[in-house]
Amino acid sequence: MAIVKNNLLVCTQLECKTSEEMLASMEKAKEEGADLVELCVDSMAPSSHISHIQTLFKQRTLPSIVSYRHISLPSFSSASLFFTYKEKSRLKSSRKSSRGGCKNSCLQVLKLALDLDVEFVEMDYEVASDMSMCELIHERSNTKIIVSSYVNGGGRPSTEKLGDLIACMQATGADVIKLEIAVDYITDLAPIFQMLTYCQVPLIAMAVGSRGLISQLLCPKFGGFLVYGSLGGKSVPGLPTLLSLKQVYKLEHTNADTKVFGVVSNPVGHSKGPILHNPAFRHTQYNGIYVPLLVDDVKEFFTTYTGIDFAGFSIGIPHKEAAVACCDEVHPLAKSIGAVNTIIRRPIDGKLVGYNTDCEASISAIEDALRERQVGNGVASHITSLLAGKTFVLVGAGGAGRALAFGAKSRGAREALKAYEVVFDAVYTPRNTRLLQEAAEVGATVVSGVEMFIRQALGQFRLFTGGLAPEDFIRKLVLEQF
């Protein structure tokens, strides 16, 4: 069944010194697929005259959000429920010297944006509560008002406190609410997804930090107003790049019914899973999204994200062995290995079932290479496994190493160090590692980790989708990427 596109907006923040640089960056953002841009006017040089800012607003080539942070510290008021009394007192005293001119400049810029009917104006909750701004907000014509607040870290915010904060912000007359939240762990995002789902006013949620990435990638599933991406492939913790949003994730196809899959790993930035599984989902018309999940505590992760929509996971380093204990059931092969690389949430009862697709993927890749070598030498073999009786040397002791060792032993191979007939490297980036290069130079048959990656991914995809696996498509996709 075709997946209907949503109305999600993709935005990027522009922080430039001059109006000319802002306009040039706006053109680049348009090329990379942004629907609108946030013009961070406070990033412009202090010498920028209001006339230059006026020119910028008039010459904008994309719908825009105008923002001006007149203070760098988190906002607080009766609605800011995340600071102690002492912290509020300290922040108040430190702000006294910063208010004056900066606040006047902020109000001047925001008033100009309202006068020129810029599509959106974003202001801190504190500014929106200012009496002089309240009047402007209620007298505006076409501009939509985004009221924002920064929520400090230090633990998972409760849904009750977030709900109270949103209610107070909405009372300013805001059309859209924006929360920027510092998160320490990926599990801190759970109440944010609840807010996105049940909030009665359009909500933007930005989780600051590398563990906050899925706050953007899963934004359309949970009903967020827009998603932010970084410009020019720039790496920004917690933000996907604009290009990845448009080329890999294609969030316009994500909706409330989309099933969430992802790779649970630490680190996770190296994973190629998203560039494989997301195109494959679309190719098979399966309504799923595959995201990187930077997880510190695998047990806490699985006890936090228990919803049926979190449907399946690839398990990466260093969690393959620890994840076994997180499963309600474990496939006999994975249990024998002592490691899982795939966990599926069974739809009928929500139980987590662990599997290992590394074993068959690696061993079958080696066996096929041996078989091709024999065919090339004009030798035919009818034995069950070409590994039977072979010397098998394993370097490595992680979850993938355990799968390799078990698979080789089950095929009848021995553990010893002699001359090598076949050399296999589980590493898949780069495709032709130094080990494989040197092995090929002395005449050994070499097997790249790319082949294992393809085969284990095919096994995972079948488990994810209940049988669908476009093998030719996935193989072509991976070989083009590596």
Image (cartoon, grey):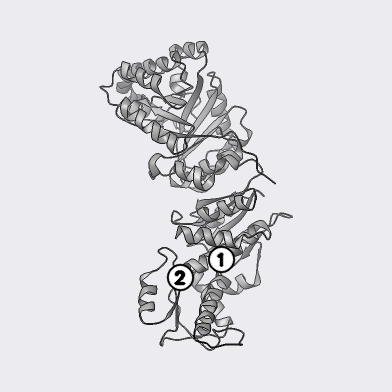
Q: Residue at x 71, y 54 (%)?
A: 347
Figure disc tally: 2
Q: CA distance from mark 1 to mark 2?
A: 13 Å
Q: Is residue 345 above or below residue 47?
A: below
Left or right of residue 443, residue 176 in this image: right
Q: Position of residue 445 (x, y in %)?
A: 44, 79
**Farthest right residue in view:** 348
Name which of mark 1 and mark 2 comes first in the sequence: 2
Residue 128 seen anywhere in this rendered image of the structure? yes
Q: Is residue 134 above or below residue 394?
A: above
**Mark 1: amino acid:** Gln
Q: Residue at x 58, y 62 (%)?
A: 472
Q: Residue at x 42, y 35 (%)?
A: 29
Q: Position of residue 272 (x, y in %)?
A: 48, 57
Left or right of residue 474, residue 437 in this image: left
Nearest the eye: 353 or 357: 357
**Mark 2: amino acid:** Ser
To which quarter of the image does residue 473 belong? bottom right
Q: Is residue 319 above or below residue 379?
A: above
Nearest the eye: 170 or 359: 359
Name the residue tied to disc 2: 448
Q: Is residue 345 above or below residue 78?
A: below
To which quarter of the image does residue 171 belong? top right
Circle 1 residues within 10 Å: few <14, some 14–19, many ≥20: many
Label 1 residue SS:
helix
Circle 2 residues within 10 Å: few <14, some 14–19, many ≥20: many
Instruction: For the C terminus, give its image quadrant.
Output: bottom left
Residue 156 seen anywhere in this rendered image of the structure? no
Q: Residue at x 58, y 72 (%)?
A: 360
Q: Position of residue 169 (x, y in %)?
A: 53, 24
Viewer-nearest of discs 1 and 2: 2
Q: Which label belongs to residue 456?
A: 1
